Structure formats: C-alpha cells, structure tokens
Amino acid sequence: MNWDPVRTGVLGGTFDPPHLAHLVLAAAARRALGLDRVLFVPAGVPWRKAGREVSPAAARVRMLQAAIAPLPWAALRTIEVERDGPSYSAETMETLTAGEPGDWWFILGSDALADLPHWHEPARLLAATKLALVRRPDGTERIPPEVFAALPGLEARIDPVAAPALEISSTDLRARIRDGRPTQHLLPAPVREVIDELGLYR
Ligand code: ATP
Ligand code: MG
C-alpha cells in the first residue's frame, strides 16, 4: 500500500493546437518533481487571448485526447471548458485541489510566469498551488524583476524545472498548416490527423 500523497502537475493552456513542446514541458515537470500524473486543462474562453479567434473547445479537447493518449501518466480535465464565462487558473486550481488531496503544482513556462501579475487574482493561485517553472537548463531566459516585486512570496512557491528550449508554438503551427508547410517534427501525428479531419487552421 502506498500512503504517500499523490503528486499532481497541472498544465493549462489554449492548446490550439497542442504540440510537442507541451508534452516535453509536462514530461520534464513529471521527471524533475516525481509527479504521479499531469492533468492537461484546456481553457474555455481564453480571456488573455481575447484578440483572436480560438478553435471550438470540442476540437481542442479532441486534439488533446489524441496528444496524450500514449502517455499513461497524463489525463485530461475539462473543468474549464464546461464552465461558463472566462477561465481563471486560480479558480481551477482551487476546485481541483479541493476535490482531491495531495501535492499540486501548476506547470508553466517562463513566458507565462512573466505574464502572471496580469492574471486574475494571482495571489489566490499561489495560495492554492505551487508552481513548476520550466526554464532552460542554463537559466538564460530573463524573468522581469517586476514579476517578483508584484507578487510577494512568489519565489518560495516556485520549484524550478530544467528543460531544453523548444522553438515551437501553436501560433507558428497554425501558420504552417495554413501555408501548407511541414509540421511533422513539431506536432504528434495523431493530433495532425484530428486537424486534417476537422479542417482546422485553413
Ligand atoms: P500560442 O502560440 O497560441 O500562444 P502556445 O504554443 O504558447 O500557444 P499555450 O496553449 O498558450 O501554447 O501554452 C500553454 C502552456 O505551455 C504555457 O504555460 C506556455 O508557457 C507553455 N508553452 C508553450 N509552448 C512552449 C515552449 N515552446 N516552451 C516552453 N513552454 C511552452
Ligand atoms: Mg502562448
């Protein structure tokens, strides 16, 4: 019998589409922190991306299912797409952690950390969860000092995770698909199959 508390990482995102860097991010956090599982949480209304059209939640959920199917430690939680209105990570983490005891980390890259002070109630997020901050192994990316100034106690809530920098983004992938450029080195093949079936990003 294993009585150790379950260790869970949560990776939130728009996942429009999910790509290999998302999987590397999750795998790196899992390895570094000894996570039992990583929950992928697609955003419902991604309010920080209000300026552009986002694929329907059902399509993003299908792509994520395809992306994580081969990973026994990965699971999908549709809590944000089932909720009306904007998705706030603070609320999501409060709901998830209240439902299941254990140790929790919210996984994010350094670009997302730099944006954290502009999120909805970041102090509430930090109260609900630790952060798994995925950084380059050489630590060269710059996190603006204002981020730490804006959020007292932030540093103590961060567990750093080293992972190689990958020049992959959903934005670039959408442009590649629209332009008919190659994606197979950036996108899991089962995700590409869903994209083609649904005719996304044309
Ligand atoms: P978009 O280009 O539309 O912004 P994205 O590729 O950044 O999409 P998101 O769904 O916004 O993907 O990202 C979810 C999470 O994954 C965020 O925490 C983000 O920091 C992280 N992430 C995405 N791409 C990378 C990458 N190449 N390296 C490290 N982290 C990444
Ligand atoms: Mg992004």
Image (cartoon, grey):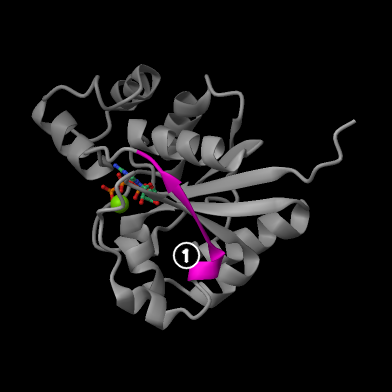
Element under disc 1: loop
In the image, the residue with mark 1 has its CB under 8 Å from the nearest atom of ligand 1: no
Q: Nearer the viewer, residue 142 or 52?
A: 142
Q: Amino acid at mark 1?
A: Pro
Of the 4 image quadrants, the one containing the C terminus is top left
Q: Is residue 128 above or below residue 11?
A: below
Name the residue tied to disc 1. 86
Horizontal and vertical percent for residue 149?
Answer: 39, 82
Residue plotted at (31% across, 52% down): 139
Residue plotted at (42% across, 71% down): 119
Q: Find the residue positioned furthest to the right.
A: 1
Horizontal and vertical percent for residue 141?
Answer: 25, 56
Residue plotted at (58% across, 53% down): 105
Horizontal and vertical percent for residue 129?
Answer: 61, 62
Asked which quadrant contains residue 35, the reply is top right
Q: Determine whether, in the image, residue 60 is placed left or right of residue 96.
A: left
Q: Could you tell me if residue 43 is visible in this image?
A: no
Horizontal and vertical percent for residue 91?
Answer: 59, 66
> Over which residues does the magenta segment extend?
155-163
